[in-house]
Amino acid sequence: MAAHGRGQRTLSFTMETVKGDAPPPSVQQPTPVFPVMEQKPLPLTGGEEAEYLLALKQDFRGAMRSLPCFIQPLVTNRDVERYSDKYNRSEQMDKLLDWAPDWKRFPRELRVHVRKPARDSVSAAVQSPPPPQMKKKGVKDKEEVLLKLESLEKKEEQETSEDEEGETKKKQEEEEAEGEEEYDEEEFEEETDYIMSYFDNGEDFGGDSDDNMDEAIY
Amino acid sequence: MTAQEVRLCGLLLQEHFGEVVEKVGTHLLKSGAQNLRTIIHETGLSVDLVKKSLCVLVQHGATTFSSGRKGLGSPTEYHTSCDRILRILRYPRYIYTAKTLYGDTGELIIEELLQRGHTTMSSTVKTVADRLTQNMAEGRTMDYTEVSSTFSKLVETHFLQRCPPLPGTPATPGTPAAPVNTAPPTPESFPECYKVPSVTLIGRGKRQLASEDGEEQRSAKRAKMDPETHGDEGIYWQVNFERFHLHFRDQTIISAVANKLDQTSSEIVRTMLRMSEVTTSPMATCTKPLSANEIFRSLPPSYNILRPILDQYLTLLVDDPMEFVGKAGESGGGMFVVNLHRALANLARATLESVVQERFGSRSARIFRLLLRKRHLEQKQVEDFAMIPAKEAKDMLYTLLSQNLVQLQEIPKTPDYAPSRTFYLYTVNQLPTARMLLQNCYKTVANLIERRLFETKESKRLLEKSQRIEAILASLQASGAEPEQLTEVEEMITAPEKQQLDTLRLHINKLDSAENQVDETIFLLESYINSTNASS
């Protein structure tokens, strides 16, 4: 091509310089991001059909967001713990469990057994001795356990293969939770180092002494 | 798989399936077929997330898996293609077509299948019946049989098809392996593709009571655990996009005829296309020849035109330069065909011409049309034929050349390409130009989506506030509050904020609507390019 030594210019410039006409000025920089348009674009076609299609599109997008196939990673890095966290987390767990595809149509390696983190941590607690675990958890754990219990109740019926396991676990958890509750209640109510049962608030004091009037009161 | 297509696919995956699936999907698109380990390693996501994303992609037909290239022992490889993901742009059109053909029931069936990917007939029927019952008047419910019959009709007209069964699982290593064919089998290569299974579905749709959320969830989950089998386990259905595309193509041809000629000729073409629906294969160049007598008999009864008038109309259609209808013989009063591929080519050409006209003006469009018709012209000839002064013609040609809509062809007179002794001819090639415009369309839609996401992100705070207030209003109204309380809550949004929300809503609607319309052009250009692939 005759334009070899001329860089990015197109061939017609060469042709025109040969013929003597002035070539148009060559552009040395990228075109502007929003160039001025000589012709304005046509307006969009309106009409009933276009509006209905628009509504369908927006509805579809909204519906897809609420389906279980919309996967959002759990945002683990939070600068500040928020009150809404515990509600958001249980919502996400609901979505993941709703979808049970037919695993025969997928390769074996893709099979994921959804283990709820709540279940795992509670089952881990079953195996380890309760007291050290309980002492580490604070007040918030009591509410978390109640939430987990509620969600576990709901998910109970879903796990057909793990039905019996679930029931036994649930019973264990209930017992544990009760034990936890009692334990936590004690600790919660006083928030001191003294154990509740040692405290004698003196209500029985007057009643005891009324029985034996013979002995003098010193 | 061009860069624009990958970018658009990424945005569509992000909007409909979330960012995790988008990451996995774009990675697979860029790097071809890969196995699970490599995907996990290269995307850097956790194993669980990658597995779930792949499940979602396979469920929706965007990804196929096959045993590895090195034989049976190697891990399964996953392959994603752009085409299936780009169909997401056309979902509203599919749903609307189903509504026009089969009513609300058809619309909901197609919508369910598009949302879930692959489902069984029984689950679809149940969900659709429930949804229809929700919208019906109090006390009325939708029967399963009605929904099943609409489903069967959709299958009979091939709008729905069965998902192809998987190749033999590697669970039986003892048996000799069947030869692995390189091309994945199409759904149509299986004989039972369009057979409706005999399903026992007796019942009515359930209306969800307005109870607390917890109860609803529990009852819904208990319903899912119903161990009813309906006799169609393992038979999954998917939407047959090709059939919808054939329908769209027919619609486009009919409306083009109506625009160019008149209503009666479009009715004639519609009748011809309807008669040849079942006899024409999807890749056919033209329909089977139909005699004028047959056409006359099959015209809809509302159009009682006389036989000689019909003949005149047919002659007009044949003589029209758009070449929609051709004459294939003289027997039976004249044998006529609808030239499908040529109609698509002409429609694509009209699209290219209108693009040039809208972007560069009608005189540049005149030059463009001239070059399309006359193939190769020198600059002097362009000026003469287009009747445009030399200087302006030169400018316009250079502009078109810099935009790559027009190409320059040199024909040397001497072995050294001396400029004074070479012919320089301007030319337009329709197919490469159509491909280039198609890529422009993909880029346009990607830009529209990005702009929409940007606008939404800018006003995120405002949108959240308005959503919260709407939720409060709804709950107040449900519990029967006084009008003063409602107005008080409504006034929490100030007037300028309301205006801002209105402009935002207007912009988002415009951008969405624009995406739908660009998709119509995309469909036309894609059909044209595919038709040339098939015939060449």
Image (cartoon, coloured by chain):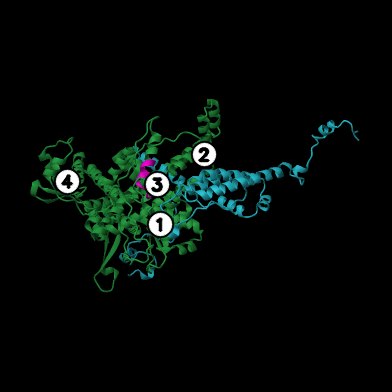
Q: Are marks 4 and 2 on the same chain?
A: yes
Query: Dot 4 lies on which element?
Result: helix
Query: Mark 3 — residue?
Result: B115
Counting from the top left corner in percent of width and height, residue B372 is at 25, 56
Q: Is residue A118 left or right of residue B74?
A: right
Give the magenta part as a residue range: B117-127
The number of discs equals 4
| B418 or B214: nearer the viewer | B214
Label pair 3/2, CB-CB below 8 angstroms: no
Residue B403 in view in this figure = yes
Query: Mark 2 — residue?
Result: B214
CA–CA distance between discs 4 and 1?
52 Å
Q: Is residue B518 left or right of residue B49?
A: left
Query: Dot 1 lies on which element?
Result: loop
Image disc number at residue B222: none
Q: Earlier in the sequence, mark 3 or mark 2?
A: 3
Type of amino acid at the residue the image marks with label 2: Gly
Q: Label 2 lies in what chain? A: B
Q: Label 4 lies in what chain? A: B
